[in-house]
Amino acid sequence: MPPARGKLHRGFILAEALIALLVLGVVFLALEGSLTIVVRSLADSERETVATRLAETQRERAFAAACAAASGTDSLNAVIVTWTSSRTGRLVRVSQTSRYPRRIGDRVEQYDAVSACQ
């Protein structure tokens, strides 16, 4: 049945507007939660990359140091990498331990590498 003359409703009623705002609020809260997870994951990824690069740099330095026994610790952005190099005959062995915080506890990785003395 067509609406009576003069009683034509246009636009939203208050209840529809409130429901739309509620739906938008829930969507924004869900997006904020997932954004937090993404940012934390990116921070974990960045620390893992820093740990890998520090360990790689230490290995290269130890292999280039004329096969001398040495040890040390490097740190950057909450990443700590300790290393020890030892000589056995014509070989140099580098042992490394990297430690960095993650969302769920600390991550500890152990690396061992062997190379001929140069």
Image (cartoon, rainbow, N blue to C red):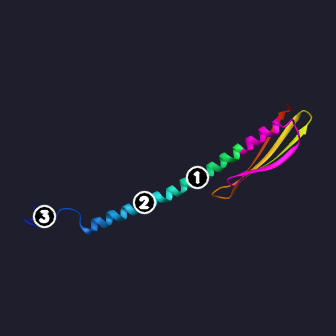
Crowding around mark 3 (Cα neighbors within 10 Å: few <14, some 14 to 19, many 20+) is few
72 left or right of 30 in image: right
Q: Which mark is residue 16?
A: none
Tell me where residue 67 appears, x and y as whole percent: 87, 37
User: Which mark is first along the chain, 1 or 2?
Assistant: 2
Q: Is residue 41 above or below residue 65?
A: below
Q: Which mark is residue 41?
A: 1
Residue sticking out furthest to the right: 89
Between residues 48 and 27, which one lies in front from this camera angle? Answer: 48
Q: Residue at x 79, y 50 (%)?
A: 73
Q: Quadrant of the N terminus?
A: bottom left
Res 92 quadrant in image: top right
Q: CA distance from mark 3 to mark 1?
A: 53 Å
Q: Is residue 77 above or below residue 25?
A: above
Q: Are marks 2 and 3 in contact (CB under 8 Å)?
A: no
- Determine if the magenta segment contains residue 58: yes
- Determine if the magenta segment contains residue 78: yes
User: Which mark is first along the chain, 3 or 2?
Assistant: 3
Q: Amino acid at mark 2?
A: Phe
Q: Residue at x 10, y 63 (%)?
A: 3
Tell me where residue 86 appears, x and y as whole percent: 88, 42
| Mark 2, secondary structure of its residue | helix
User: Which mark is first along the chain, 1 or 3?
Assistant: 3
Tell me where residue 14 appears, x and y as whole percent: 26, 69
Between residues 4 and 95, which one lies in front from this camera angle? Answer: 95
Residue sticking out furthest to the bottom: 14
Q: Amino acid at mark 1?
A: Ser
| Mark 1, secondary structure of its residue | helix
Location of mark 3 (residue): 8
Instruction: Give the extent of the magenta segment.
Output: 54-79
| Mark 3, secondary structure of its residue | loop
